Amino acid sequence: MSKEITSREQDYSQWYNDLVLKGGLADYSAVRGCMVIKPYGYALWENMRDQLDRMFKDTGHVNAYFPLFVPRSFLEKEEGHAEGFAKECAVVTHYRLKNDPDNKGKLMVDPDSKLEEELVIRPTSEAIIWNAYRDWINSYRDLPLLINQWANVVRWEMRTRLFLRTAEFLWQEGHTAHATAEEAVEETVKMLNVYAEFVENYMAVPVIKGVKTPNERFAGALDTYCIEALMQDGKALQAGTSHFLGQNFAKAFDVKYLNKDNKQEYVWATSWGVSTRLIGALIMAHSDDQGLVMPPKLAPVQVVIVPIYKGQDQKMLIDSKVLGIVDELKKAGIRVKYDDSDNARPGWKFAEHELKGVPVRLAIGARDLEQNVIEVARRDTKEKATVSLDGITGHVKQLLEDIQTNLFERAKAYRDTHITPVDSWEEFKEVLNTKGGFVSAHWDGSGETEDKIKEETKATIRCIPLDAVEEEGKCIFTGKPSKQRVLFAQAY
C-alpha cells in the first residue's frame, strides 16, 4: 500500500494529495476549485465539529443560521471589509434559466430575471448577520449576544488545494456583540484559547498564539488574534483566527443599544472561525509515507479488529469472542470496527487501515484464541505486542491515551527545534532556504518592510507572539530599531 504513496522527501505536495485521495478523505469535484468530502473525511470533520460545538456551548454560545446570500449593498457598508473580500466574491445576477430557442436542449440565462440588486454568495457572514443584529439589539439587557453559525462559504480562489484552500469550504463563524470594548477583547482572547485548546488537546498539534500585523489582519478588524501551527515540511499554517472588530460593523449597520444611563451607544463586536482547513493541518502534522496518522480523540475509527482464520469453523469461534470485545470497547466509548469482510486477505486489510491512520489494530487468529491472547499494533510507532485478552479494553483505552500524547509530543519536538532566532538578513535567508520553520527575528514595525521581505523570500510575519518579551534589537531588513521579535515563516 505504501508504494502507492509518493514519499514526503520526493514531493511533499504530491504526498499530501495522495493521502487525501487514497486515504478516502476527499475527491476532486466537477466544479472547479471545489471538493467532495467523502464519508471517512466527513466523519473526521463531524468529530471536530461536535467537539468544538460542545466547547462553544460550554462558553455560553448558541447556534443560529443566516442566509447564504448577502446583498451587495450590505457587503459595501464596511469599507475595509468590502475591499478585503471583493476579489474573492461569487455574484448572483439572475434568478432563472430558460430554454435557448437557438440551441435546442440547451439553457440560457433569462434576461427578464435580472435581480434588482446583485447577491454575493457569502465569503463570510458579518454583513448579513450585523444587519439582523440591528433588530435584535436594543438594550444593554440584550448583551452580550453570543452566536455561532456552522455553514459553508465561498471564496473564489484561483489556486486551490484539497482542504487547505478551496472555492467552497465548511466552517464555523462566531459573531458576538458586547457593551464595552473590554468585554469584546476578552471574548476575542477567550475564543482564541478555545481554539488553541482544541487544536492541541484533540488534534495533538502544538500552536503559537499571537496577533497579526496590520497587513495581515482580517478585513474590517481592529485586531486579529491567531494560532499558528508548523507542518512537517517546515511551512506554517494558520489554524484559527479570532477578531476584535471594534465598532466598525456596529456603525456600518447602525447597531446601538440603550445603556443603563438611558444613553445610546454602538455595540462592540468580535468574530472568530475555523474551517475544514484543520483537516489539512492534521494530515500534514502527523502522517507518514505509509499513510494517514489519526489522533485517537478525533479518528473516525479508533480501533480495528482483523480476524485471521481458515474456514468458517475458525471464523465462528473468533466471531464469538471478538463480538464480546467489540461490545466492551463500545461501552467504554471507543469507536471500533470489526473488519470481518471476506473480500480481502488480512495483509491487505492491515495495509488499508494503516493507510487510513486507524490508531490501534487488533489481530486475532485461532491459535491466539486458544492461548487467550491478541496482537496489538499501534499506528504512530508501528510497534506490535501480544497481550492477554483479559483486560484488553483497559489496555486499549490506555494505549489510545498514550498515542494521543505521543503524537503531540512528537509534533511539539519538531516545532520547537524549528523555531530559529536570527539577527541578520543573510542568516534569515539561510534558515528559510535550508531549515525552514519559524524564524524569530526583529522587525521595524513597518508594513512596507513586511511587504519587501515577503516579496524577496515569500516569508510572512505569522504572528507577534502573545508571550513575546521586550528585547531591544535591529530589524533584520532595514537595521532600524525594534523592541521585540516576531515570527516569520513561509506558509500555506
Image (cartoon, rainbow, N blue to C red):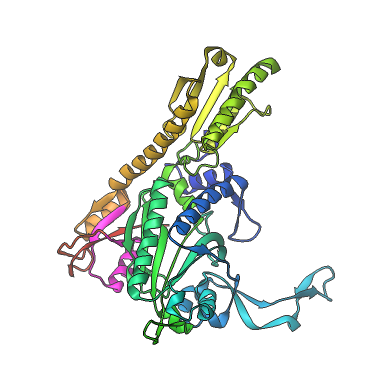
Q: Residue furthest left?
A: 472
Q: Position of residue 492 (x, y in %)?
A: 43, 57
Q: Position of residue 313 (x, y in %)?
A: 69, 15
**229 or 157, which is in the foreground?**
229
Magenta run includes residue 489:
no
Can residue 80 be seen here? The reply is no
Q: Position of residue 308 (x, y in %)?
A: 60, 20
Magenta run includes residue 453:
yes
Can residue 399 be seen here? The reply is yes
**321 or 167, which is in the foreground?**
321
From the viewer's perspective, is 469 left or right of 293?
Answer: left
**Which quadrant of the rendered structure holds the N terminus?**
top right
Q: How many numbered badges does the structure rendering display? A: 0
**68 or 492, which is in the foreground?**
68
Which residue does the image show at 18% across and 66% down from the upper left? 483
The part of the chain drawn in magenta is 438-466
Q: Residue furthest bottom?
A: 263
Which residue does the image show at 54% across and 77% down from the upper left? 132
Q: Position of residue 279 (x, y in %)?
A: 49, 50
In the displayed structure, would residue 270 be above or below residue 20? Answer: below
Which residue does the image show at 25% across and 70% down from the upper left? 445
In the displayed structure, would residue 110 be above or below residue 312? Answer: below
Which residue does the image show at 56% across and 12% down from the upper left? 370
From the viewer's perspective, is 359 left or right of 433?
Answer: right
